Image (cartoon, grey):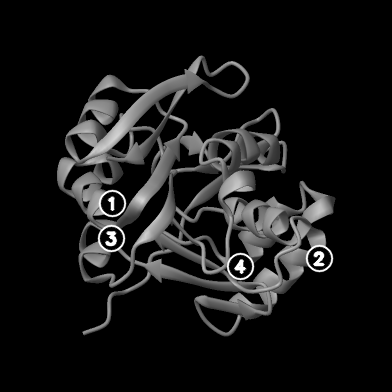
């Protein structure tokens, strides 16, 4: 029997920033979500230096699709002409109307956002000459177990561990490690001690580094 999709329930701050009602948190920084994504996930995984043909990014928490768009934009800007592979796990997807509204914050992503929304109207895959992406809808704790791939880089982008503990459970982080290629990496905005310990125990060499704006620290790591 197919899982029933439950869309995210939102409130809007200043008609610009989506707030999850379930988790009581914004989907991106109130300062600049795109800059935050570039700092935490793109730089955190050193993607500028690591991108190569067949590179595969995976993430926990698709949200607005901002991380995907920023990664895709970087891939194109660096001159790659083969498809970037991107897989995202999302339990409570936004409606496409809400997603489109949120992404209007960044006009520089408009052409990619338009392509994203148009393709998602037909299902949870995006295929272009420079992107091969899939959003896997459902509980990542179950879905990741049956995923038959390994990622070169992980974006751990659930809501805060205090409010969204499901995406920071030991077994899930172990599964993340199991689905990480040799010398693969992760990055996340959180520097919570128990998250870093769990990732370390899962097989990552973990570092705490400078976070974005007022966030003092974040975490990065590579597969041991």
Q: Residues within 10 Å of mark 1 (few under 14, many from 20)?
A: many
Q: Residues within 10 Å of mark 2 (few under 14, many from 20)?
A: few
Asked if the residues shown at circle 3 and circle 4 are in contact, with their CB atoms under 8 angstroms apart, the answer is no
Of circles 1 and 2, the one toward us is 1
Give the SS element for disc 4.
Answer: helix
Looking at the image, residue 122 lies above or below residue 65: below
Residue 158 in view = no
Asked if the residues shown at circle 3 and circle 1 are in contact, with their CB atoms under 8 angstroms apart, the answer is no
Badge 2 or badge 3: first in the primary sequence? 2
**x%, y% of residue 25?**
48, 35
Which residue was labeled with disc 4?
96
**Spatial separation of the CA atoms under disc 1 and disc 4:** 27 Å
**Spatial separation of the CA atoms under disc 3 and disc 4:** 20 Å
Asked if the residues shown at circle 4 and circle 2 are in contact, with their CB atoms under 8 angstroms apart, the answer is no
Which residue was labeled with disc 3?
139
83 displayed left or right of 223: right
**x%, y% of residue 194?**
23, 25
**Spatial separation of the CA atoms under disc 4 and disc 2:** 16 Å
**Spatial separation of the CA atoms under disc 3 and disc 1:** 14 Å
Which residue was labeled with disc 1?
176
Badge 1 or badge 2: first in the primary sequence? 2
Of circles 3 and 4, the one toward us is 3
């Amino acid at each position: 029997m197919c899982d029933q999709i439950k869309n995210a329930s939102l409130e809007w701050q200043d008609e610009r920033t989506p707030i999850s009602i379930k988790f009581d948190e914004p989907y991106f920084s109130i300062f600049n979500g795109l800059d935050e994504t570039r700092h935490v996930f793109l730089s955190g995984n050193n993607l500028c230096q690591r991108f190569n043909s067949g590179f595969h990014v995976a993430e926990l928490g698709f949200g607005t699709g901002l991380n995907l768009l920023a990664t895709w934009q970087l891939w194109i800007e660096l001159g790659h002409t083969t498809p970037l592979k991107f897989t995202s796990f999302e339990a409570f997807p936004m409606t496409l109307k809400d997603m489109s509204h949120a992404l209007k914050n960044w006009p520089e992503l408009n052409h990619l956002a338009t392509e994203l929304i148009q393709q998602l109207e037909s299902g949870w895959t995006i295929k272009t000459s420079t992107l091969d992406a899939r959003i896997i809808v459902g509980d990542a704790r179950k879905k990741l177990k049956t995923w038959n791939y390994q990622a070169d880089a992980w974006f751990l982008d659930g809501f805060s561990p205090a409010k969204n503990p499901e995406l920071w459970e030991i077994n899930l982080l172990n599964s993340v490690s199991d689905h990480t290629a040799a010398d693969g990496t992760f990055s996340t905005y959180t520097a919570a001690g128990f998250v870093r310990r769990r990732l370390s125990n899962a097989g990552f060499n973990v570092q705490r580094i400078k976070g974005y704006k007022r966030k003092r620290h974040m975490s990065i790591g590579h597969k041991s």
